[in-house]
Amino acid sequence: MRAQIKSQHYIPRTAVGWGTVEASSHDVLLVGGGGAGLRAAIAAAEINPKLSIAVVSKVYPMRSHTVSAEGGAAGVAKPDDSLDEHAYDTISGGDWLSDQDAVEAFVREAPQELLQLERWGCPWNREPDGHIAVRAFGGMKKKRTWFAADKTGFHMLHTLFQTTLKYDPITRYDEWFVTKLLVDDGRVQGVVAIELMSGRIQAVLAKSVILCTGGCGRVFPFTTNANIKSGDGMALAYRAGAPLKDMEFLQYHPTGLPFTGILITEAARAEGGYMLNKDGYRYLQDYNLGTPESKPVLRSMELGPRDRLSQAFVHEHRKGRTTPTPHGPVVHLDLRHLGEKLINTRLPFVRELCQKYQNIDPVRELIPVRPVVHYMMGGVSTDLDGATPLRGLFAAGEVACVSINGANRLGSNSLPECLVFGARAGRAAAEYASQPKPASTAVLAQADDEQRRLNSEFLNKTGGRERIATIRTEMQAIVETSAGIYRDEASLVEGVGKLQQLQQRYRDINLDDRSHTFNTELESALELGYMLDVAESIIKSALHRTESRGAHQRTDFPARDDSSFLAHSLAYRNPDGSSRVEYSPVKITRWPPGERVYGQQTQQQSQSKTTEQVG
Amino acid sequence: MPAVKQPTMKSAPQYTEFHPRWYRPRVSVYWWMGEWHYLKFILRELSSVFVAVFVVETLMLISALRGGPEAYAHFQQSMRNPLVVVLNLVSFFFIVFHTITWFNLAPSAMPVRLGGRRLPDVLVAAPSYVAWLVISVFIGWLVLR
Amino acid sequence: MADKIVLEIARYSPEQDNEPHFESYEVPVYKEWVVLDALNHIKDTVDGSLTYRWSCRMGICGSCGMMVNGEPKLTCATFLSSYADNGKKIRVEPLRYFPVVRDLVTELSDFLVKLKKAKPWLIRKDEPPLSQGEFLQTPEQLDRYKQFSMCINCTLCYAACPVVGLDPIFVGPAALALAQRYNMDSRDQGSAERTAVLAHPDGVWGCTFVGECTRVCPKHVDPAGAIQQYKIASVIDWLKSFVMPKGQTT
């Protein structure tokens, strides 16, 4: 039979004969092939070379969003630095919501992981004597950020991807879109995925599943995140009954381009850029951020903390002093006074990004900027080894919440987080999978059910009246209004109501594309479903946390409340489809909660803390 | 195996569920004519033929010189043939084209590093041009004096 | 600048078509809009079945490569306004020399096989324990291969290279440049292992230095330069092998 088929027909990877396809089966299955996913795959392969490891990713691994990270990866490297200081910076930056045992493990393993990456070929920048170079980064009091030019995430991801090519036990399922976790007997047993190339829906069975799908920035209208960051893993876990932790904590970066969301790095402000409102006024001086000087002053005005800058934007907007544009309200970053020469030597990447992707020249024009969602501190709740409460399910990277970032992440902590917890989850999943597990055939029936569901709800459905893009845009607008930089009860409750309406309208979606082959419209529809679930968990968690901490600011509850809320919120989906939010206490080991302050006070405080630990 | 329908008209595609047929356009024999960059490349490669023409002519010149004044006069006569003149003009254009493209491409094949950094291609190509000019001037002087 | 422009887009659905055909769409032109924004606009509002790949929208993931008016380009970095000013239409097709799966989506498994053939990982004869710290590498040593490490695997170079089109087994610019990146990395000790794939008629010797790959590369990797440098190094090695049978420089 096969001989009759011409070679240009696609033959599914698991085809036995021409028609039959076997459900494939592995020991460890990664959903997502980015920094965390690839690191976990390598870790599992190294712990037990006999295991069969699958990486199932909806895009080719080198397209994963890890690739766009620029700044660097923090790891204690120099003799004048210490693990305790890195831990303290992380914990205080996270406004004491970080689990301190996790942070201690993280800071200890981060330098090892970064070193291992160097051994795999990552081209870290070097000092003249050949040792790894480190640089300063916002929020870190010592220089400990390793970097590879301006493209740390790119080099890390490509190094990891090229290294995985060495390991035969790793099988990649490129461009397979996971639609459901297979759960039976209280244990995760694999996934159901659409093979985008052919449209076939198939169960991929596994003894353990690690979610590494990244964050959910696309739930918001203005984000640095790529199109693929739709919170897939978070929604998959949520629907399977695993809790989502700390979902109300979203990090905004104060200067992103309004249309593309591209990040304009803090370096542009550090070199002396001004932030101006629509009257050309340096408005930050109105918000307790110092007085305007001609040269930049550390921690003052434009170099103030990120969340304060984002909050200032919201205030300016409410006063009507932001500039309206077709892409929303903006303020302007003025680099013109720095001159072409300085911009070309110190900020060439900023200029290149603006010109090549948004057609603006910072030497001559004002750069429109606004706060953009950058990182999701929350995610699938895991322990130190990446295990979720659902047996067989693990998670690592931005999709997971261990939590080390607490209420606010420090820059350059997220790349080592992928590596450290990716490796830990890989090892833990490998050990879990090495123990014998009873096989379950019931899950194969679930895969057939899933195929029927997708056909009836999307591919064969007639009469739908909604377009995906309409619902998506409305969802993004609601989430930004109710769970943006500032929140209050009224807008959050309204958000819950509107989201429910959108969930209803989602069931009425009409697809233009009914074909099987590479149906990206079906993929977008499924991603929208995930985003609606994630949005629900964000707004509900924000509604229940009646305090302000880190990135979660309630105008009706402006103070931090350690007595009630030194705890992680856990959002669960009940079996009947409703949701609930519970709390679990933060693990405090050696650093009792303090004030998150800036300037002189912080220096003194951290010094006294260090002597406490040593003495 | 599901029955595969034979196409009755050319518009009906042969599709078997979940086995999409990839479209593979054939690369035309005239691939090099559609684009200026490709055409430039083919001309560059063809210029080697004209380099060979000049080499052959030089060999004939040397052979004529060895043959004595009559052979040399006969050679000069054949060089005056209008077809040969046209050939030589065309060859000369291609030789210059060949030389310029060669000089411009050489730095990327042989990067020169000085003081820890790679020299810009222009600087690496420049000495070749200078040498070309100097040698041409020298030979011109030898011939025309 | 004109406020509207027409895009002619290649459409192909293996379930309905035998071969691709073009469909025209009119889209608005804004100063910041790139071809990718136009495609998104069409997919969101006009025809949801338009199929293409994209992700980061900032030229680092390498998903959105397509032929725009016959030139391989990243559509996230190609402004509509540069065509609208000239009054031209924009013709969008999938990348050349790859099989087409659907509309603007190409089939990349062959490329990945070739990438793997080049053994693009650090090969060491010895692996000292991590406690001994990093391999030392001076900024100058880093500079030698850094340019070749910038490849985002967008495959624009494959769409530009006529050898790829004419000889399907040719390993191709990106894979060869990546192999050279590791060959030139001072920490790598495995160039001997890559010789079989590189110094081969379908490896570097298949390249005729057309140079198109370097011209279209959005990250200025200069794969053509990498290939020619390897050719020279490999010839020197071959000559040396007569004098010093076990010695090697690459």
Image: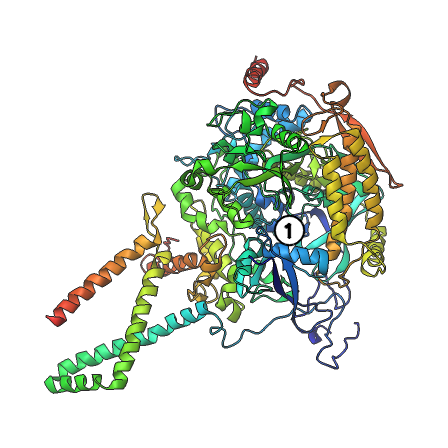
Which residue occupies 53% across, 61% down?
C72
Is A87 placed above or below A332 here? above
Relative horizontal placement of residue A248, taking residue A293 as reference (left or right): right
- Judge whether residue A172 can be spotted in this image: yes
Relative horizontal placement of residue A484, taking residue A443 as reference (left or right): left
Extreme top residue here?
A615
Which residue occupies 53% across, 31% down?
A137
- Judge whether residue A74 can be spotted in this image: no
**How many labels were placed on the picture?**
1
Extreme front residue here?
A279
Nearer to the camera, B14 or C43: C43
Extreme right residue here?
A576
* Residue C192 x %, y %: 44, 55
* Residue A336 x %, y %: 47, 38
* Residue C29 x %, y %: 60, 56
Q: Secondary structure at mark 1?
A: loop
Which residue occupies 42% across, 35% down?
A127
Give the amino acid type for the residue marked by disc 1 in the picture: Pro
* Residue A559 x %, y %: 72, 20
Relative horizontal placement of residue A433, taking residue C176 as reference (left or right): right
Which corner quadrant holds the C terminus of chain A? top right
Residue hosting label 1:
A169
Nearer to the camera, A298 or A166: A298
Is A93 placed above or below A183 here? above
Of all chains, the one bearing label 1 is: A
Few, some or many residues within 10 Å of mark 1 (<14, 14–19, 20+) = many
